[in-house]
Image (cartoon, rainbow, N blue to C red):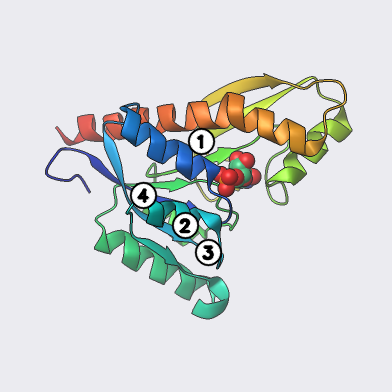
Amino acid sequence: MVDRNQKVNIAVLVSGGGTNLQAILDACGSGIITSGEVRVVISNKAGAYGLERAKKAGIPAFCITRKEAGSQEAFEEQVIEKLEEHEIGLIVLAGFLSILSEEFTSRYDHRIVNIHPSLIPSFCGSGYYGLKVHEAALAKGVKVTGATVHYVNEIPDGGEIIMQKAVEVKEGDTPEVLQRRVMEQAEWVIFPKTIEAVCAKILREKE
Ligand code: GAR
């Protein structure tokens, strides 16, 4: 769980482009994250660009799909196998768009964090992911949105909130423009910071 250099071994789970994964990798390189190190990247979607980003950074990357595994249970078993193989102490969901079972989330209580592109409790829960979140925020006409990092429990987007950052919605925003602003101003900023804080906490608890 903690390696010889006293860092928490991190697994990043992705489903798509992996810009948050990239922000985490960059933060490990620049010294924003010093209490943890990304050891493995797992995608549940074949062809996810996040897998390429991992390979470019020299990090073991695997694709495990529910379809190929045959069931949610078998899928999660294969994920757990990889997590154990890499002695993972913190699981980071970075644009991982599959809901994990209660068996899985309770096994890793306070050891899974997720980023969601809104200010929870707005525009969250089942069905709210990726661009859909920003479409809903624009449809409602909110003037402020943002991003939230939270622990993951059995309720989708329902775990304890760790960090949030607000972002302004501007006149004429499209979902794509707003998504990009939320990523740049909030997600890529608070996610690495939160991961560092959570890893440091895990290390303190081990002392
Ligand atoms: C990010 O905006 C992330 O917050 C969101 O998906 C995007 C993934 O982008 N996650 C959710 O909506 C989870 N409910 P990325 O693959 O470029 O990091």
**Residue at which label 1 appears:** 150
Tell whether circle 3 marks a residue whose Cβ is less than 8 angstroms from ligand 1. no
Name the side, left or right, on which 43 lies relative to 168.
Answer: left
**Mark-to-mark CA distance, 4 and 1:** 26 Å
- The residue closer to the viewer here, 188 or 144, is 188
In which quadrant of the rendered view does residue 62 lie?
A: bottom left
The local secondary structure at tag 4 comes to loop
The answer to which of marks 4 and 1 sits earlier in the sequence is 4
Question: Which amino acid does the dot numbered 4 rest on?
Answer: Ala
Using a 10 Å C-alpha cutoff, classify the residue at mark 4 as few (fewer than 14 neighbours), some (14 to 19) or many (20 or more): few
Give the spatial CA distance, label 4 vs label 2.
9 Å
Residue 175 position in % (x across, y down): 79, 37
- Residue for point 75% across, 33% down: 177
Q: Which of pointers 3 and 2 lies earlier in the amino acid sequence?
A: 3
Which amino acid type is shown beneath numbered disc 3?
A: Asn
Disc 3 target residue: 44
Residue 52 - label: 2
Question: Dot 3: within a 10 Å radius of its alpha carbon, few (fewer than 14), some, or many (20 or more) residues?
Answer: many
